[in-house]
Image (cartoon, rainbow, N blue to C red):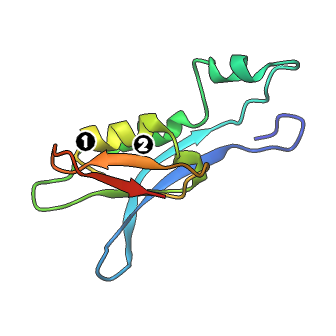
Amino acid sequence: MDNGDHQGYLLQTVLAVSPTTRQVSGIAAQHPFLRQPAPEGETTHQRERRKQKESQVWQEQAQSIGMAPADCEYIHVGDRGSDIFAFMEVCQALGCGFELRVKHNRRMDLLVDQGDTPIQLK
C-alpha cells in the first residue's frame, strides 16, 4: 500500500509459543492497521481524548484470543506500546497473565489475596 509517503500498513501479530520448548506453535491473532498522522496543531489533551488509538490493538488482540482452556495458561508478553491500563484490565478479566516492558518508571502497590500486605514493584 502506498499513501504517497511510501508508508505501508503495520501488522500486529500475536505468536503462540510453548513455554517449555520455546517453539512457536503458530499465530494466535493478527491485526493490520494504518498509522494515522496526528492532525496539525493537535494538543496532548486532544490526542489523549481521541476515540481511536493505535494502542487499542493490544486489548483488541487479547479479546480476540479470549480465555485459555482449563488445562492451559495464556501469558501476554508486550513491548512498551502495551503499557496501558486497558490492556492489563482485559488480560485480568480474561484470566490471562501479562509481562510488559513498561514505558514509564513507576511504583505499583498490589494487594495479595485480598489481604492487606502490599507488594511493591519497581
Vertically, is 97 above or below 18? above
Instruction: Determine whether the residue tagged by mark 2 lies in a helix, strand or loop.
Output: helix
**Camera-side residue: 58 or 85?**
85
Disc 1: which residue: 94
Return the residue found at the far left: 70
Residue 122, relative to residue 17: is it above or below?
above
Three-letter amino acid code at disc 2?
A: Gln
Q: Nearer the viewer, residue 107 or 92?
A: 107
Q: Quadrant of residue 121?
A: bottom left
Q: Amino acid at mark 1?
A: Leu
Q: Quadrant of residue 76?
A: bottom left
Q: Which mark is residue 106?
A: none
Q: Residue at 61% of width from left, 48% of height from top? A: 104
- The residue located at (61%, 50%) in the rendering is 103
Locate residue 41 relative to residue 78 in the image: left or right.
right
| Residues at discs 2 and 1 in contact (Cβ within 8 Å) | no
Asked if residue 54 lies left or right of residue 113, the reply is right
Q: Residue at x 37, y 47 (%)?
A: 109
Dot 1 surroundings within 10 Å: few (below 14), some, or many (20 or more)?
Answer: some
Q: Position of residue 112 (x, y in %)?
A: 21, 51
- For label 2, the residue is 61
Q: Looking at the image, can residue 76 be seen?
A: yes
Instruction: Give the x, y percent position of residue 58.
Output: 48, 42
Q: CA distance from mark 2 to mark 1?
A: 12 Å
Q: Residues within 10 Å of mark 2 (few under 14, many from 20)?
A: many
> What is the x, y in percent for residue 26?
38, 65
Rendered position, 57 above or below 82: above
From the viewer's perspective, tell me whether residue 94 is left or right of residue 56. left
Q: Nearer the viewer, residue 86 or 115?
A: 115
First of labels 2, 1 by sequence position:
2
Horizontally, is 54 left or right of 87 in the view?
A: right
Mark 2 or 1: in front is 1
